[in-house]
Image (cartoon, helix red, strand yellow):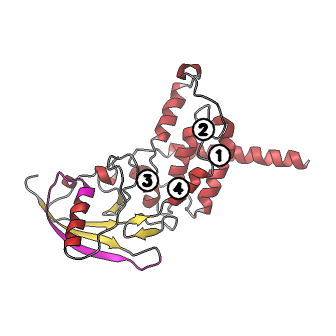
Amino acid sequence: MSGNMNLTIKAWRQKNAQARGGFETIKLSNISPDMSFLEMLDVMNEQLIKEGKEAFAFDHDCREGICGMCSLVINGLPHGPDSLVTTCQLHMRKFKDGDTIVIEPWRSAAFPVIRDCAVDRGAFDRIIQAGGFVSINTGNAPPANTLPVPKADADRAFDAAACIGCGACVAACKNASAMLFVSAKVSHLAYLPQGKPEKQKRVLAMVEQMDKEGFGNCTNLFECEAACPKGITVEFIAKMNREYMCATVLYAEKVYSTEA
């Protein structure tokens, strides 16, 4: 592509979760195709401030595809038209001169709007707090070669741990399901020996908290996998379902034996 671009931005503006929102049309000129999407939004905000308008609120932090904060639906796609990237890794060369770009927030009752396209994803934090960690005190970390882990299990745990908790899976799902996120966190620890002693307790607690937060159910459309910037696979949902069923049966047996 030669030269810079002129763009029309339709940005979602909303004062808070209770207010009624709507799109604001903003014309931008001289946008470099080498800019990241967030750099383009910085330019847009500079223009809005010069015009005496309120800046557009959006979430960001590392701008390196690590933190998962840059949660935007761009032209109907979480994180935009590129694959396996976050919004901060999306570059304007993916768009053409004269394009109209529609920007919306993650839309889920469990992710209330803070302002414009910044949403509260505290629900994910509360799910992790419900049990997405190893709480048993194991002392100092032993040398890695004294705790053998089958390579297949180590690889799968690493794949699940790649989840950055951005919420794109929720935004892409018609049910606003958090199953891909929760299954990645459950599977990450369930594959490793340090996480096995608490795996039944962990999966029951995290799924219960997920339901309390108001996320929907999974109906196996795989939109979450397609939208995930880290390529988390729905195979982890199947693993979590197995872990959950086993934990439910073991819990029921424990209650039955206690009552007997």
**Amino acid type of the residue tagged 3 in the rendering:** Cys
Q: Which residues are magenta?
A: 18-39
177 left or right, relative to 51 = right
Q: Is residue 219 visible?
A: no
The residue closer to the viewer here, 114 or 109, is: 114
**Amino acid type of the residue tagged 2 in the rendering:** Ala
Q: Which residue is mark 3?
A: 166
Q: Does 73 sit above or below residue 131?
A: below
Q: Does 247 sit above or below residue 170?
A: above
**Amino acid type of the residue tagged 1 in the rendering:** Arg
**Amino acid type of the residue tagged 4 in the rendering:** Phe
Label 1 close to label 2 by CB (< 8 Å): yes
Q: Which residue is mark 4?
A: 124
Q: Which secondary structure, mark 1?
A: helix
**Is 19 included in the stretch rendered in magenta?**
yes
Mark toward the start of the polypeptide (1 vs 3): 3
Give the Cα separation between the discs numbered 4 and 1.
15 Å
Return the x and y of residue 82 as percentages of the image width and height: 29, 51
Give the Cα separation between the discs numbered 1 and 2.
9 Å
Residue drawn at x 42%, y 55% is 168
Q: Which residue is mark 2?
A: 190
The outermost residue toward the right is 260
Give the Cα separation between the discs numbered 1 and 3.
21 Å
Return the x and y of residue 249 as percentages of the image width and height: 74, 46
